Image (cartoon, coloured by chain):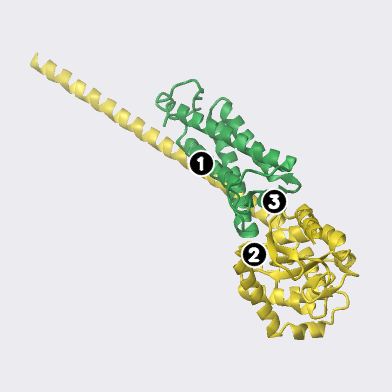
Chain colours: A green, B yellow
Amino acid sequence: MSARTLRIVLIVLAVLGVGWAGYLTYVHYSGATPVCSLKGDPCAQVQKSVYSELVGVPVALIGLIGYLLILGSLLVHEEERTRLATAALALGGFGFSAYLTYREVFSLHKICEDCVASAVLMTIIMCLSVWRYLRGGVGAAATAPASGPEPATPLGAAGP
Amino acid sequence: MSSSIEDDEGDLTRKQRREQARAQRKALEESHAAAAKRKSRLTLLGIIGAIVVVIVVVIVVAAGGGSKSGLPTSKHEENATVAEVSKLVDGIPQSGNAIGSPTAPVTLKYFGDLECPICKEFTLGALPSVIDKWVRTGKLRIEYHSLETATREPEIFKEQQVAAYAAGKQNKAWNYIETFYHEQGEEDSGYVTENYLDGIASQVPGLDIAKWHEDRGDPNLANEVETDKQAANNEGFTGTPSFLIGHTGGTMSKLSYPGSPSEPAFVDEAVEKLLKSS
C-alpha cells in the first residue's frame, strides 16, 4: 500500500471515528437513547453508567478529542514526527478503548455495540498507524540518502 | 596492441569490481541504517506503549470508585451512610426481605446482586424517590430477591445475599441492602470478605450482631437464595436489576426500564397504572 493510500485510509477512519464519538457525545449530553439493536438496550445502560465519565468528563468526549487529534496529526505535513504522533495517539486511544471494554465486560457485564464499534475502529487505526510509522516514508526512501533527514510525503504526492 | 586491449579489459574489470564493491557497501550501510532506524522506532513505540499501559492501570485503580474495600475509611463517612439509609427506611415497616406495608396494593419484586454496579445505580438513583413517593405512603411494597450476575464466586454470592436475608430476620434487611449498595466496593476486587459483611452489619442501627451471625447459618436463607434464582430463571431474567410488578397477591408482570435504571420514571408510571386499575 502506498504512503498516500495509507494516509487517506487513516484519514477516512479518523473521520468515521470523529463522527461516531461525536454522536456518542451528543447522546451523553442530550440524554437521548442511543441506537442499539441488542436486547435489553445495554448501550444506554453502559453509556449512562458510572463508568461513562472519567473524573467528570464523559468518555465519549475524551474519545472525540482523541479522534480529532489523530485526524489533526494526519492532516498536517507528513514527516517522521507526525507519523510518530499519529501512532502514539492511536496507541493511547487503543489503551483507552481497552480500558472501556474491560469495564463493559468485567464491571458492567454489558456489551454496548456503539462502544465496541468505536473500539474496533480505534484498533484498526492503531494497527495501521503503527505499521505506517515502522515502515517509515515509503517512496521517499528510494531517493533519500541513507542517513540524514527523511523527506516529507505530501498528501498530493503519489507514492509507489 | 593486444596487450593494451588486455590492460583496458583488466582496468574495466577492476573498475566494475570497485563499483560493485561500492554498491554492496552502500547497500549494506543502507540496510544497517534502516535496521537501526527500525529498531529505534520500535523502541520508541515500546516506550509509548508502556506509558499507555501504566496510564490505563492508573485509571483502572483510580476510577475504581475510591476505596476498593468499599467500607468507609472514616467515622464521618460511616455516620453519613448510616444517616442517609436511616432517613430513607426508618418509619417504614419491614418484614423479611420486604419493605412497605403488607397491605400495599402494589408489589415490586427487585432481583439484584449486591455486587452489581447497575443495581447500585438503581438503588441510589431511583429507589429513594420511589420509596418516598410510593412505599412510605403505603401504596407500594418492595421485595428484594437474589440473582447472581456480577459476583464471580457463587459461594461469596450466597454468603452476601444470606447476610442481607439474615438481617431480614430482625426486619432490617433493607438497612443492610441499602448500606451494602452505598458502600459497594470495586467489582472483582474480592472486597466481600467476612470482615466486610461484618462492617456492613455494624452500620445497621439496632441489629443484634450475635443473632445475625447465628441466623446466617440458617439453611432456609440459603434455600431462599436458591428459590430466587429459580424464580428469576423462570422469568428468563439474565441481568440485574430485573423487576416484576403487579397487584399484591396477583399476577406479576415484567417491568423493563429504558436505558438506565437510575431514573424513577419507569417505576412511577407502572405503579400509577396499577393503582388506577385497582
Tell us which disc is closer to us: 3 or 1.
3
Callout in the foreground (2, 3): 3
**In front of the other: A118 or B54:** A118
Q: Position of residue A114 (x, y in %)?
A: 60, 45
- Residue indicated by mark 3: B258
Q: Which mark sits nearer the N-terminus, 2 or 3?
A: 2
- Please state which amino acid type lies under the numbered disc 2: Ala
**Residue appearing at x 51%, y 41% in the figure:** A124
Cβ–Cβ under 8 Å for marks 2 and 1 = no
- Within 10 Å of disc 1 (Cα), the crowding (few <14, some 14-19, many 20+) is some
Q: Position of residue B121 (x, y in %)?
A: 74, 57
Co-location on one chain, circles 2 and 1: no
Q: Chain of mark 2?
A: B
Q: Is residue B143 above or below residue A13?
A: below
What residue is pinned by disc 1?
A124
Quick check: can you spot residue B29?
Answer: yes
Label 2: few (<14), some (14–19) or many (≥20) C-alpha neighbours in 10 Å: many
- Residue at x 71%, y 77% (from the top left corner): B162
Q: Amino acid at mark 1?
A: Ile
The spot of residue A11 in percent (x, y) is 54, 31
- In depth, the one of B40 and A41 nearer the eye is A41
Q: Chain of mark 1?
A: A
Name the chain under label 3: B
Q: Residues within 10 Å of mark 3 (few under 14, many from 20)?
A: some
Amino acid type, label 3: Pro
Alpha-carbon span between mark 3 and mark 1:
32 Å
In the rendered image, which quarter is residue B127 located in? bottom right
Residue holding disc 2: B150
Say which element carries label 1. helix
